[in-house]
Image (spheres, rainbow, N blue to C red):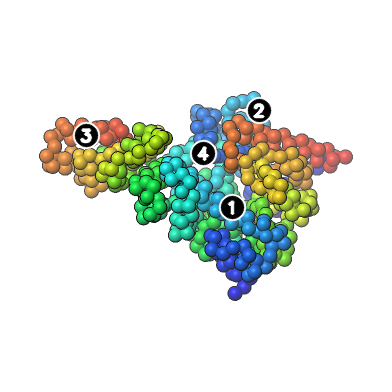
Amino acid sequence: MTTKTLNPSFVDRFHIPFLGYGIGLRRKHFDAVLHALPKEPSHWNRDKTFFSGNSPAPKDNHSTGLCDRVDWMEIVSENYMGFGGRPMFVLDRCAEHMPILPHGVNLSIGSPDPLCTDYLTKLKSLCDKIHAPFWSDHCCYSSAGNVYFHDLLPLPFSEEAARHVARRAKQAMDYVERPLALENISYYAKMPYSSMQEAEFLTAVLEDADCGLLLDINNVYVNCQNHGEDPNLFLDSIPLSRVVQVHLAGHRDEGWLRIDDHGSAVSAPVWALYAELVRRIGPITTVVEWDNQIPELSVLIQQAEIARETAKAAHTTQSAGEQR
Amino acid sequence: MNHLDLFFQTMRAFLVGQIPIDTVESQLGPSSSGSRRFAFYRTLVRNDHHGFMEKLYGFTQDVLQDHFSGCVSRYLTAHPPDHWEPNQTGARFPEWLRHDSEAILIAPWIGDLAQYEWFEFVVYTDPTPDNPVESGLSLNSTMRALKFEFDVPGWITSGRPLAEPNPGPARRDLILLMYRDSRTLQCKFLEATPWTQLIVTSLENGDDPLRVATAAGADAETATQAILELTRVGLLHNTSS
């Protein structure tokens, strides 16, 4: 039996761990999360358990304990950078029990403005505090001319923009002293001056900057639907060996446009595309995002469990295929 | 100017509402996805900015009702968001509201109300550690002393924001001490009395509050009781044995 090695080059060079299946930590769930954490700090060892590349332990779907059902948590970096009080208290408790990965929204890697050193300093401090093996943000811009738009805005898919982003990504990684994974965003309009396809643009950025890819499967699906493209061809066209993490989320169909609103459960076509990805690259660190009309914690945990089962089934199929 | 510079310059003006999509298209060329989708980004950015303000200023929005959105738009034009932390979008809103003639006409106390809401957020998320490091008596490091011209705190605690019809808070000068209780991590407040102010000021200056209070004319028993009470409610920490 042959086992497909996960992202050999990037994972090996940067010691990227497989963390399993997680959920986003959101303020609405603070009380429920604290209630569901074990009373005593867990015995997970960040040096020996996950970060050596071993798989997380099997989970108990009938348990009410959070750590029995979820392997790790993702936080929105900016919600904890320079903040204390209850948000930091809850983060500290969670970090006692499971790995935490920081996912930013305002690095603004494509901005024409200089990288914000205040931002990077606080981000590095956060990464140090939670022992993050890598950090992530979006391949986009969210500020320009000293105005923060607080949205993930698409860049022109051009060689000029790709070089610009890659140069800044290298600077940011040097500052934070950890590998960076850039996420493919959802985009509703292709920007003027675009001379490439999205996959070509992403590949140019990732290869030039030597970054990881946080592959948002919902965004792939939404973009392909909105722009009449084939999601499987998109997967064919990006460097899958650089995928270090996957995002799953819900979207809504407005008729004229599919909106990536993170306001519902993961849709069936997105689960199918996720399974296709796992068949191609094997199990991958995965998180389910839910940011609007946030449901009870149990619903989010169920989504993470579906991700685990979907990946398990897809990987089994892939392994059986290879055996034949 | 290269393509990327022109792109950002034009998109910035569009995204903050200074130029319409037609102008963008005439300067950069059209999007192959069509004008409607291109223009959608202005709506998204506007919704994001207004969304942060609505989360921060729920009571203020309740009072201004349909006027809130217009106020926020005028405020964002005067103070475009210039910080990576989204909540900082609203940092200058209370002071701005005090000078916005439309808002003041609806509620003269609107600036005080927004100040209350802003500092509730600031204190709740204050990065200073909750556990006192000094030995002896110390001031809760998250405390902010704020001047109010209207009794907004009393009005909020009595449930008046939800009252219909709503008379608004009474006119009254007061100093409010807002702080985060290190036991519950919730924001609390206390109206400062002259004795409270004296104790707080003496601690800020590194003086012994008991000595300062008695020197100012308080008897030792009264001053001690005041300090004990402030410790009980979490404004002061006492780590002495």
Q: Where is B119 relative to A180, above or below?
A: above
Local crowd at mark 3 within 10 Å, few (<14), some, or many (≥20)? some
Residue placed at 30% from the left, 38% from the top? B190
Q: Chain of mark 3?
A: B
- Separation (CA) of disc 3 from disc 2: 54 Å
Q: In x, y percent, where is residue B157?
A: 36, 34
> What's the CA distance linking mark 4 and mark 2?
24 Å
Q: Which residue is mark 4?
A: A27
- The reply to whether discs 4 and 2 touch (Cβ–Cβ < 8 Å) is no
The residue indicated by pointer 3 is: B226
User: Percent position (x, y) of residue A320?
Assistant: 83, 38
Q: Do badges 3 and 2 share one subunit?
A: no
Q: Nearer the viewer, residue A1 or A65?
A: A65
Q: Quick check: can you spot residue A53?
A: no
Say which chain tag 4 marks.
A
What residue sits 63% from the left and 55% below the top?
A: B40
> Which quadrant of the rendered structure holds the C terminus of chain B?
top left
Q: In terms of secondary structure, where does tag 3 sit?
A: helix
A69 and B99: which one is in front?
Answer: B99
Real-space CA distance between mark 1 and mark 4, rounded to the nearest whole angstrom: 23 Å
- Label 3 sits on what residue type? Ala
Q: Is residue A284 above or below residue A183?
A: above
Q: Measuring 27% from the left and 35% from the top, which residue is drawn there?
A: B230
Amino acid identity at mark 4: Arg
Q: Secondary structure at mark 4?
A: helix
Mark 1 vs mark 3: in front? 1
Which chain does the numbered disc 1 sit on? Answer: B
Q: Amino acid under label 2? A: Asn
Amino acid type at image mark 1: Leu
Query: Is label 2 on the same chain as label 1?
Result: no
Q: Which residue is mark 1?
A: B44
